[in-house]
Amino acid sequence: MIRRKPLSVSDPTWFRYLLISLSLAVIGLFLVLPLWTVLTEAFAKGWASYRDSLMHPDALAAIRLTLLTAAVAVPLTTVFGIAAAWAIARFDFTGKNLLVTLIDLPFSVSPVIAGLIYVLVFGAQGWLGPWLAAHDIKIIFAVPGIILATLFVTFPFVARELIPLMQEIGHEEEEAALSLGASPWQMFFSITLPNIKWGLLYGILLCNARAMGEFGAVSVVSGHIRGLTNTLPLHVEVTYDEYDFVGSFAGASLLAGLAVVTLVTKTFLEWKQTQDIKTARLMSE
Amino acid sequence: MSITLRNIKKQFGDFIALNTINLEIPEGELVALLGPSGCGKTTLLRIIAGLEQADSGQVFLQGDEVTDQPVKSRQIGFVFQHYALFRHMTVFDNIAFGLRVKPKAQRPSKAEIKDKVHALLKLVQLDWLAGRFPEQLSGGQRQRIALARALAVEPSVLLLDEPFGALDASVRKDLRLWLRHLHHELNVTSIFVTHDQEEAMEVASQIVVLNKGHIEQQGSPSDIYDHPANPFVSQFIGQTNVFNLEQTDTFWLKNSGLPTPQTGRVAHVRPHDIELTKAANGAAQAVLKDWQQLGGLIRVELLKQEAGGQPATIFAEMPAEQFRQLSLQKGEGVAVRIRHAHWFH
């Protein structure tokens, strides 16, 4: 083993091993063991039972709704994120700091509150409730409410990721493209987008993980109507409450799988992004 | 293409970047916008390009007003200070970019683009770099690729923002000369921004001296050096010794053989307009403090001697050979003759 520091400054060996084993024990106890439990419980009654509980119409409906929610929320969040990051990184305007603070709001508000806000606005007793009822538009305890709540909790992810990246990259390449005769759209698709793509994908990935896994906000607005307004996390809860452990843990195993895929992709994207930032620094020397 | 600016004003918050700029640049010139940092020169360049909008005033290219036209339709080539090469594109794709984004009707064929890019790479003497990415190039190479990219769209005006600012001293010297030659070859009206007066003198055919948002003087390099319009230009361009008649220099200046003018209280004297001789006993006006060899020239540091006056440092320059013949020692007294001065109020 190569010593990087003189002996007098480095910590004693026993201390290092103590810290390392402590960290491993905590990770094992709180992360690996639960994941293992999810899998053993899901397969407790064998593969067939696992498959059956995932093929159950309610489970399938929950998966479909989760995918639909993500399919609507993620693109909207992406467009919003790019627009907000563009405005913040490129322009100076009054209220810029306020906008940055507001983008962070969903991080500091409890998701349950986020759900409640929508109930208060769109619910039967809410501000817009009577008008919505008169026009036969259902938002709360229906799919639109779930999508709205998901949008609320996910909308900072892409913007937060892009703002520092776009500030680091700067505006010069875009100006160069314009001076060479590119239209604003040509500039965006051939210069801006390739430069921010790894950061953007990173934001989309985190956003997608949250959109599919969100429980609190969605739980408040969903109404838990089986086969209609249950997303996968809600389906896990409902089946668990009914002592259908295989069904519950089978659903949970899907979410756990999503988490693992997210984690691996995330590591890759982080690595790609550091490369990009290194290049950005190199190029502005 | 000629460039005309009329009453250009630009403010950033409370800071006045440009205060009523009027400027006429004839076709085919290679112009330096010269000034200390923060004088507004880059802002002015960006306004000509259309990358920045003036608060008021007009921009004309070849007599046509383009004040409200976007950068895209001004037919300019812009070379950025840090080159702004597209980092995810090869050198070839960088140069081809301006041709590929043209509307279908005007877009050259693939073969034509290829020919053109290679011709430009030959022009900047970097044909062997076509497949590289910007991060793999040296500063000087990036600079020339940025220039080739700007030239690809055949601009009528070439604008360069601190083109040599980020380069090593040795590379900078080569590129200056090269830019001058390239300009002769292409004869496209060009403006470059610089804070380095030597660079402006060496490269430009016209110099515009800017200070605090307004134009101090415009003219050929020799015009500006030999006939500075005001104390700022005189001190900013080249070395200058400043003598103030109202202070204690009156007697000293008379002794140096400089006729006192009708107007003007402050004399600006170039180092090469000061002539030194060994002082006869008691006639020393200055003491030789130190000297440095600058190539074929010697720069002499003198301490001015005057009863009651503060000992001030004066710089004189002379050919090395002449200095040797004087055989002066450090600490020795010298007599000073001033051949010529610019007088200001």
Image (cartoon, rainbow, N blue to C red):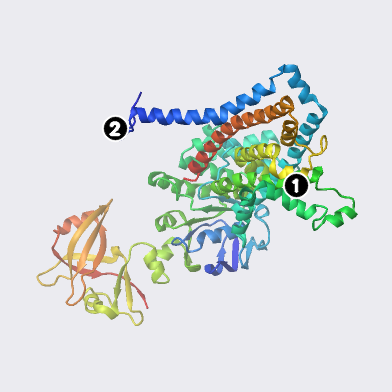
Q: Nearer the viewer, residue B280 or A102?
A: A102
Q: Quadrant of the C terminus of chain B?
A: bottom left
Is A28 located above or below residue B19 in the figure?
above
* Residue type highlighted by circle 1: Leu
Q: Earlier in the sequence, mark 2 or mark 1?
A: 2
In which image quadrant can residue B89 be found?
top right
Q: Does the residue at mark 2 contact the one at mark 1 (Cβ under 8 Å)?
A: no
Residue shown at 54%/60% (left/top)? B43
**x, y percent for residue B267:** 32, 74
Residue named by callout 2: A6
| Subunit under mark 2 | A
Q: Residue furthest left?
A: B281
**x, y percent for residue A258:** 66, 30
Residue named by callout 1: A148
Residue shown at 44%/27% (left/top)? A21
Is A67 located above or below residue B30 in the figure?
above
